[in-house]
Image: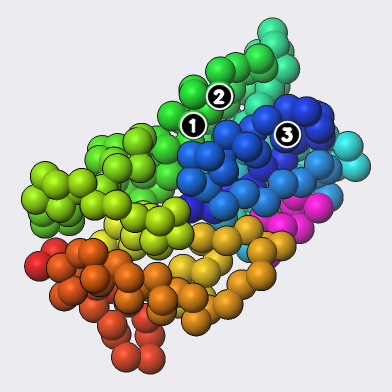
Amino acid sequence: MRVLLVEDEPSLRAQLSDSLKHAGYAVDEIDNGLDAHFLGDTEPFDAVVLDLGLPVLDGLTVLKRWRSSGRMMPVLILTARDNWNEKVAGIDAGADDYLTKPFHTEELLARLRALIRRSSGLASAVLQCGSLTLDTRTSRVTLDGQSVVLTSHEYKVLEYLMHRIGSVVSRTEIIEHIYAQDYDRDSNTVEVFIGRLRKKLPAELIETVRGQGYRLGPV
Ligand code: CA
């Protein structure tokens, strides 16, 4: 899952970025509203963490522009303490959730998980496909109750597919959701990750749909 992190305060941005990466997200970091607007308008993100007080273009304007051009990704806004009208304005502009600074990183991570699963139409933090489970809180994967050990990239691919059970997902789509923009992307690597996942999971779980991509289905 890929997150756009927009925060102009360098130390907070670095800290949040580390925490998000540690939690398994691909992270694009931006420090101003103009670049944030552009990236959010052109790249697919699973969620956005958006500070409202930003240089060049303020966060509220960025959010309004995304929503008016039909960008529907979940957005969590970061607001200043005791500024209740900023929260109201943010929610009215299309924010899905907010956090008031200062906050605990664990709370940010929990709220992001909730936003991402809600936008995929999922109710639980534990994703299930037949006898396969993936716990988005702990990044633990089990098959018939037994732990399956995955590398971080294998996990990211599986996590994305588990959010799209039954849908055909192209290689490009997978790439766009497991890597940040500055990463050296090679769509052939998806094939490699899928091949490895098939060795660790029931092979028929991930179906190849010729010329279109992959489909994770209950077997
Ligand atoms: Ca700020």
The answer for how far apart the CA atoms under marks 3 and 2 are is 12 Å
- Left or right: residue 31 compared with residue 56: left
Q: Between 166 and 149, which is closer to the camera in this rendering?
A: 149
Q: Is residue 164 above or below residue 215?
A: above
At 57% from the left edge and 43% from the top edge, which residue is drawn? 21
- Report x, y in % for residue 40: 67, 55
Q: Few, some or many C-alpha atoms within 10 Å of disc 1 (few <14, some 14-19, many ≥20)?
A: some
Residue that badge 2 annotates:
105
Q: Is residue 59 above or below residue 173?
A: above
Label 1 near ligand 1 (CB < 8 Å):
no
At 56% from the left edge and 18% from the top edge, which residue is drawn? 104
- Report x, y in % for residue 217: 19, 67
* Helix, strand or loop for disc 1: helix
- Report x, y in % for residue 179: 57, 61
Asked whether residue 73 appears in the rendered view, the answer is: no
The answer for how far apart the CA atoms under marks 2 and 1 are is 6 Å
**Farthest residue in the right direction?**
56
Quadrant including the C terminus? bottom left
Query: Along the polypeptide, which appears first: circle 3 or circle 2?
Result: 3
Q: Quick check: is 40 in the magenta stretch?
A: yes
At 53% from the left edge and 28% from the top edge, which residue is drawn? 108
Q: Quick check: is 66 in the magenta stretch?
A: no
Q: Is residue 192 above or below residue 88?
A: below
The three-letter code of the residue at mark 1 reads Leu
In the rendering, which numbered label is found on residue 13?
A: 3
Residue that badge 1 annotates:
109
Disc 2 + disc 1, Cβ < 8 Å: yes
Residues drawn in magenta: 35-42
Q: Between 175 and 165, which is closer to the camera in this rendering?
A: 175
* Helix, strand or loop for disc 3: helix
The answer for how far apart the CA atoms under marks 1 and 3 are is 14 Å
Asked whether residue 210 appears in the rendered view, the answer is: yes
